[in-house]
Image (cartoon, rainbow, N blue to C red):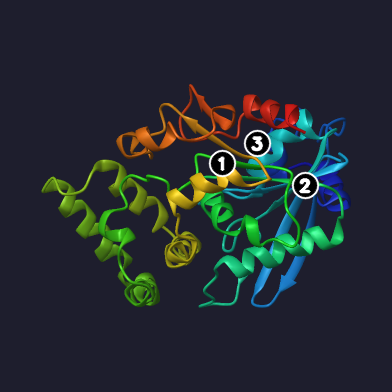
Amino acid sequence: MNIRFGLNCWLWGSDYDDLSRSGRLDRNGIALFQTWILTQRNLQLGEYHWSVRTYGNGPRLLIVLHGFGEDGSIFSDWADPLGDYYTILAPDLPHHGNSTAVPGADYGPQEVIRVINAILEDRKDPYALVGHSFGGRILIGIWKQLSRPPEAVWLLAPDGLATKRMGLVGKLPGSIRKWIAQRIDTGYRGWIRLARRLHRLGLLDAFSVRYMQHHLSDASKRRRLMSTWIALPHFSVNRDQLLRDAREAQSPIHLVIGKSDPLIDWELLEDWLKKWPASRLHVLDAGHNLIRAEVAEMIRQGS
C-alpha cells in the first residue's frame, strides 16, 4: 500500500480492503475519491463493541445487516447507486469485521436491537431495513421491536426460511453447543477428521466438509462460527408469522430470492411462496449472493 493512500485512509477512516474490493483504487493503489468515502463509527454497548460503516449521504437511512462470514463492507458497492437517496449504515455483526465481544458473550435479539436503536436515536430520518442471509434471519425476529417502524423491510435470501444442510447441527440444544464451543480450539482437528470420515461413508456432502475446513481453519474464524451457531436459536424463524406480517404489517416486507440459491430447499417453500403478496416477491435469476446492482435499483425505486 503506498504512503499517500495510507494517509488518505487514516484521514477518512477508510479501509483498504473495502476500497480495493469495490474497485475504487487506481492501478497504483490510490483511492478514487470522486466516489463515496467510507467512514466508520464505533459503539460500545454492554459486552459488545460494534463497528458501523457508513456509505453515501442521502436524506433517508438504509440500515443493512450482512450474512455469516461477511461484514458491512459487502454493501460498499451500493454507495454509488444509492448514495444520493440513502445514507447506508452497515454494522458488522459480533465477531465479524471489526466488531468484537467479551469472550463467552452470548448475543441475541436485544443486542442487535440495541445497536439499531442507537443509530435511530442519533439520526431521526426515515429509514428502511435490509438483511442478507443470516442478517435477514435476524431482521425477521427484531424489526417490529425497534424504537420506530421502518418504511420498508427487504429480506435478501434470508436464512431460516428453508435452509438446507442444517440437520442435527441445527437441532442441538444450547448447552451442547456451548460445550463444543468451549473445546473447539483444542478439538477442531478431530471435528474435521470426523467430517471427512462421514463424507467417505456417504453421510455428509462435500460442501459441508469444505465449509467446516474453512471456518475451523483459524482461531478468529472458529470464534465467529461458534458465536453465530450459539446465537441461531435466539433468531428462530416462524414462517406462518412472517407470512401474516407480509400481508398485514404497515411496513411493506419485500422478499428477494435467487432461483439458483443452493441453500434453499425449494420444495419446502413452493406452496408458501404462492401466498406471499405478489408485488413484494422478487425471484431473480441468481444464486445466494443478492447484494447486486439490480436489487439496489429495486430499493431505490421504492424510496
Q: For residue 168, which numbered disc appears in the image?
A: none
Spatial separation of the CA atoms under disc 2 and disc 3: 27 Å
Q: Secondary structure at mark 2?
A: strand
**Residue pointed to by mark 3:** 21
| Tag in front: 2 or 1 | 1
Other-residue count near label 1 (Cα within 10 Å), few / some / many at <14 / 14–19 / ≥20: some
Q: Is residue 101 left or right of residue 210?
A: right
At label 3, which amino acid type do we have?
A: Arg
Height in image: 287 above or below 228? above
Q: Quadrant of residue 141?
A: bottom right
Residue beneath disc 1: 247
SS at mark 3 in the image: helix
Number of residues whose C-alpha sits closer than 10 Å to that of mark 3, classed few (under 14), some (14–19) or many (20 or more): few
Q: Of residues 144 and 178, which is closer to you in this image?
A: 144
The amino acid pointed to by label 2 is: Tyr
> In screen coordinates, is 290 left or right of 56?
left
What's the residue type where badge 1 is placed?
Arg
Q: Is the N terminus in the top left, top right, bottom left or bottom right quadrant? A: top right
Which residue in the rendered view is the most extreme toward the left?
201
Q: Between marks 1 and 3, how big is the CA–CA gap?
A: 38 Å
Q: Nearer the viewer, residue 223 or 148?
A: 148
**Residue extending furthest front?**
248
The image shows residue 97 at horizontal and vertical percentages of 62, 56
- In the rendered image, residue 115, in percent from the top left (x then y), is placed at 71, 64
Left or right of 183: which side holds 3?
right
Q: Percent x, y for residue 7?
A: 86, 48
Q: Quadrant of residue 177?
A: bottom left
Task: Classify 10 Å Cα crowding around label 2: few (below 14), some (14-19), many (20 and above).
Answer: many
Identify the disc placed on residue 127.
2
